[in-house]
Amino acid sequence: GNSVTQMEGPVTLSEEAFLTINCTYTATGYPSLFWYVQYPGEGLQLLLKATKADDKGSNKGFEATYRKETTSFHLEKGSVQVSDSAVYFCALKGTSGTYKYIFGTGTRLKVLA
Amino acid sequence: EAQVTQNPRYLITVTGKKLTVTCSQNMNHEYMSWYRQDPGLGLRQIYYSMNVEVTDKGDVPEGYKVSRKEKRNFPLILESPSPNQTSLYFCASSLSAGGGTLIYEQYFGPGTRLTVT
């Protein structure tokens, strides 16, 4: 079945540092890929998405590129801020006819001033 | 304001006492879903609904029931709760289930923290 594997946290960075959170997936065909963010005490919010190979999703300075050859969708940001401290989830939705979502285990990011 | 609401936000109950967690959205969304969030396991989908009267199992449906009699509501029912159902539950909705490259954002509720003793 489909699965998502993301790097374990927590990840602790200083403000303005470069961020990478790794995410790899297993799925048949061409799933859609997502990054969601969860701020303390809140529900999840969509951060970015990509629906086909080589697509780059981007939002709020975050980017992720859908790499079919390496089955990866790594999240990056060039310069993190304290306000980026949150839990980040990689997720996938299968190809047509499959309406389930599969989420990774989440990676907690803490940014220090 | 467009939103997904859940009630209650916090619930402590005892083993075997039936409970319902309500979920409502005001965006006329077709697709609704329930997830549970557990440390080290991330979010796991319990059930989802494509539209009124259309529901299907997610990855962890055992011990849960759902119904979709109205488009806006998607209650989660625990007929006989057990301690292993202690978790943080999220309801989510999106305009449609989508398909192919047509993907719609899921909007999440604030969560319901359930403790079963």
Image (cartoon, rainbow, N blue to C red):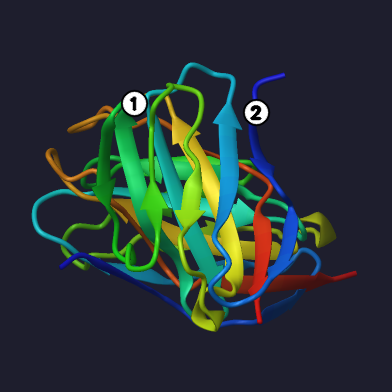
Measured from the top left, where is residue A16 in percent x and y?
77, 63
What residue appears at the point 50 percent right and 23 percent down from the top-left corner? B72
Measured from the top left, where is residue A75 in percent x and y?
49, 60
Q: What amino acid type is highlighted by mark number 2? A: Gln
Residue at mark 2: B3
Measured from the top left, where is residue A59 in percent x and y?
57, 40
Residue at the outermost left position = A29
Badge 2 sits on which subunit? Answer: B
A60 to A87, vertically: above or below: above
Image position of A93 (left or right of B75): left
In the image, A9 versus B31, the foreground residue is B31
The N terminus of chain A appears in which quarter of the rendering?
bottom left
Q: Are marks 2 and 1 in contact (CB under 8 Å)?
A: no
Q: What amino acid type is highlighted by mark number 1? A: Ser
A22 to B19, vertically: above or below: below
Dot 1, crowdedness within 10 Å: few (<14), some or many (≥20)?
A: many
Image position of A50 (left or right of B87): left
In the image, B114 versus A36, the foreground residue is B114
Residue at the outermost right position = A113
Measured from the top left, where is residue B6 in percent x and y?
65, 42
Can residue A45 be spotted in the picture? no
In the image, B56 versus A94, the foreground residue is B56
Which dot marks residue B96?
1
Can residue B65 be spotted in the picture? yes
What residue appears at the point 64 percent right and 67 percent down from the top-left corner? A18
Q: Disc 1 on helix, strand or loop? A: loop
Mark 2–mark 1 distance (CA, rounded to whole Å): 16 Å
